[in-house]
Amino acid sequence: MFDTLTDKLTAVFRKLTNRGRLTEKDVDEALREVRMALLEADVNFKVVRDFIAKVRERCVGTDVLEGLNPAQHVIKAVHEQMIAMLSGGDRRMMAASQPPTVVMLLGLQGSGKTTTAAKLALHLKRQGGKPLLVAADTRRPAAVEQLVALGKQLDLPVYEEGTRSQPIAIARNGLARAKEMAATWVILDTGGRLHIDEELMQEVADIRRDVQPQEALLVVDAMTGQDAVRVAEEFHKKVGLTGLILTKLDGDARGGAALSITAVTGVPLKFIGVGEKADALEPFHPDRMASRILGMGDVLTLIEKAQENIDLQKAQELQKKMAKSSMDLGDFLDQMRQVRKMGPLSQVLGMIPGFGAVSKNLPTDEFGDKQLAKVEAVILSMTPNERHNPDVIDGSRRRRIAKGSGTTVQDVNQILNQFRQIQKLMKDMASGKKMPGLPFGRR
Ligand SMILES: Nc1nc2c(ncn2[C@@H]2O[C@H](COP(=O)(O)OP(=O)(O)OP(=O)(O)O)[C@@H](O)[C@H]2O)c(=O)[nH]1
Ligand SMILES: [Mg+2]
């Protein structure tokens, strides 16, 4: 996501950093390039105009802070203004004074409402909530089935009446059911249409008026670019929204929708969808998103993901081993499996500062995952002693391992070499010799 934009902005900043002293002309030129990059990323032109004007104000109007060189000063101004552009309204979920809190999802057909309903329910459950999904999309029988299937798969309760009843009746009965079972959240999936039309607006507005949800969240597809912004404006005018969820940000969207939607509508982005899987929903954080876009990595999201997926005790053990340089192939396998749980490799690496550029040069995720499966097979075909002392693996053992894992001797050689390199890197890092490079030099 935002790869092209990030590349362009990183290039602009690198050029600035290399300048040393900055003249006003240098800053103007840099801002012109930033402006172009944003427009090419399909950011709304008024939003861009306003953005550049404010960054210039920040650059000119404030003294260079101690400890920052002029280029860093400009980068900081861009970063802060980007956070401002992405912020607006209250991003927290509004809670009902008496549970359950009702969250209504609405949006055009195919924007991701049903998938997002399930993702959101899972997210709330992981936070200790007790959600009930309610299938109020009666346009197609398949819509109800889709939600029921997702509920079964994720072990989440679903309330449904097929497609016989009216959405409002289903919503009311769903709410009653939620109270009976002491659910704390009701997630209402509603029907969508291909285009905005009066009938859809009316239907959605009627449900909203009747059910009085604490949250009316519009689900919009980031891939539709500026259309997403127009859709949001329209829904907000006709139905009234409390927040936005932008889906498919994992796609090759140029990012313009994400960057302009709150600035144009004044409605806060509350969550972003970053994949098809049920856990690919993230609370939206303007500061993290800005850092990601500017190629500064997104360490906080990475840490959260790690906390959700990584066994802390194992991680600490490994850290000790790393410090003693005694990590073996078994630990390596463990670690690899844990990282894999965090999502596609390129997404995970993209969040580490300075690794944004590296992650794009990696093979595609599918290949990356295949590669990881191969590494796994090879390590599993080793004896515990071989895993612990890879140096004992001679030619004939390599052939045996290749055969046992369905790979070739070259594969085994390559994996052993890679492991040695990683081992060396860890040793260097543990002794403080080498750290992953930061994008803009020292900070
Ligand atoms: N890559 C990606 N795909 C997504 C994301 N969110 C949803 N999708 C996919 O988008 C498609 C449509 O999602 P649905 O949840 O069925 O959309 P909907 O808004 O309920 O559609 P209707 O019920 O037809 O109005 C599905 O194939 C989802 O897997 C996302 O964040 N990333
Ligand atoms: Mg649906």
Image: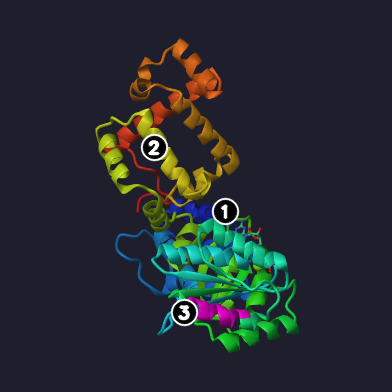
Residue 232 at what x, y percent from top left? Answer: 63, 77
Name the residue at 59% across, 38% down: 367
Residue closest to the far top = 396
Q: Measuring 58% from the left and 60% from the top, which residue is drawn there?
A: 150
Residue 63 lies within the magenta run: no
The quadrant where residue 42 appears: bottom right
Q: Which circle's residue, 1 or 3, is located before the other in the chain? A: 1
- Of circles 2 and 3, the one toward us is 3
Q: Which span is picked out in magenta?
A: 170-178
Give the labeled residue for mark 1. Answer: 3
Q: Nearer the viewer, mark 1 or mark 3?
A: 3
Q: CA distance from mark 2 to mark 3?
A: 43 Å
- Characterize the magenta stretch by its predominant secondary structure: helix
Q: Is residue 171 above or below residue 368?
A: below
Q: Amino acid at mark 3?
A: Lys
Marks 1 and 2: which is nearer the front?
2
* Three-letter code for the amino acid on which mark 1 is drawn: Asp
Q: CA distance from mark 1 to mark 2?
A: 30 Å
Instruction: Identify the image quadrant of the C terminus.
Output: bottom left
Q: In the figure, residue 104 lies in which quadrant?
A: bottom right
Where's residue 289, x and y in %?
Answer: 48, 62
Q: Which mark is residue 179?
A: 3
Q: Is residue 333 left or right of residue 114?
A: left
Q: Is residue 280 visible?
A: no
Q: Which residue is mark 2?
A: 334
